[in-house]
Amino acid sequence: LPRELLETLRAQLGLPQWWQGASQLEIVAGALLVQRTTWSNAARAVETLRDRALLSVDALAAIESNELATLIRPAGFYRTKATRLKGLARFIASHGGLATLDTLPTDVLRRQLLAQPGVGPETADVILGYAFGRAVFVVDAYARRLFERLDGSQAGLSDGELKERIERGLPDAESLNELHSLIVSHGKRYCRSKPCCDGCPLSDRCQYFALEES
DNA sequence: CACCAGGGTGGTT
DNA sequence: AACCACCATGGT
């Protein structure tokens, strides 16, 4: 199913344009800043960091948390995110930089990332998939909503089970990356209610299409 | 004005 | 293990 779904989304939506040309560290910072926020708000914070030449591990590890907080304010939860972003930079620095971390196997690196405050399963997988190019599928709110609406056995799976199933059916990093970025970059087009909306791109396969309101 | 957005954390039942 | 409140801004 994952391969087929990728083909369907690719045909309907075309190539996603998401995080193109961003540096490794910019992706790491973006993954943290976008938590529970719109990408447009997170992007403002990222651009500010870029303009101030703060998108280096050493600069982020050294900046005062209060100052960092004011700079990333548009991303929301800015005090929390500031201390966590600085902590993440200090973690990277203490391990000799991103290139050194990249020598670790994916499962080990994932555990290391999850041990950092503010890095949960989704953020860890975004970092693994987009900053380190690992073969990982990111289960986020859009993916969860989409798979809930596809008929078949996916309904009721835990995040971990869904992630494993997708990764088993689509083992290469390129495809997993493309599938997830297609899902999120067009996620707002998918219906959120019963019955499914008329414009739903997957209306022919959506479980909730043509349901009566309950 | 109310509700939402690509989460994570710590506490309570 | 399943809830809950909290963190906070910007858009509709």
Image: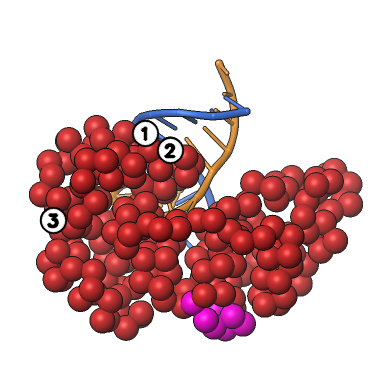
Chain colours: A red, B orange, C blue
Q: Which residue is mark 2?
A: A41
Label 1 is placed on what type of residue?
A: Pro
Question: Label for residue A74?
Answer: 1
Q: Which one is nearer the viewer's eye here, A64 or A193?
A: A64
For disc 1, the chain is: A
Label 2 vs 1, first from the N-terminus: 2
* Contact (Cβ within 8 Å) of mark 3 with mark 2: no
Percent across and percent down for residue A123 are 39, 60
Label 3 is placed on what type of residue?
A: Asp
In the rendered image, is residue A81 in sight? yes
| SS for callout 1 | helix
For disc 3, the chain is: A
Quadrant showing the C terminus of chain A = top right
Percent across and percent down for residue A4 are 72, 75
For marks 1 and 3, give the CA distance: 23 Å
Percent across and percent down for residue A156 are 65, 66
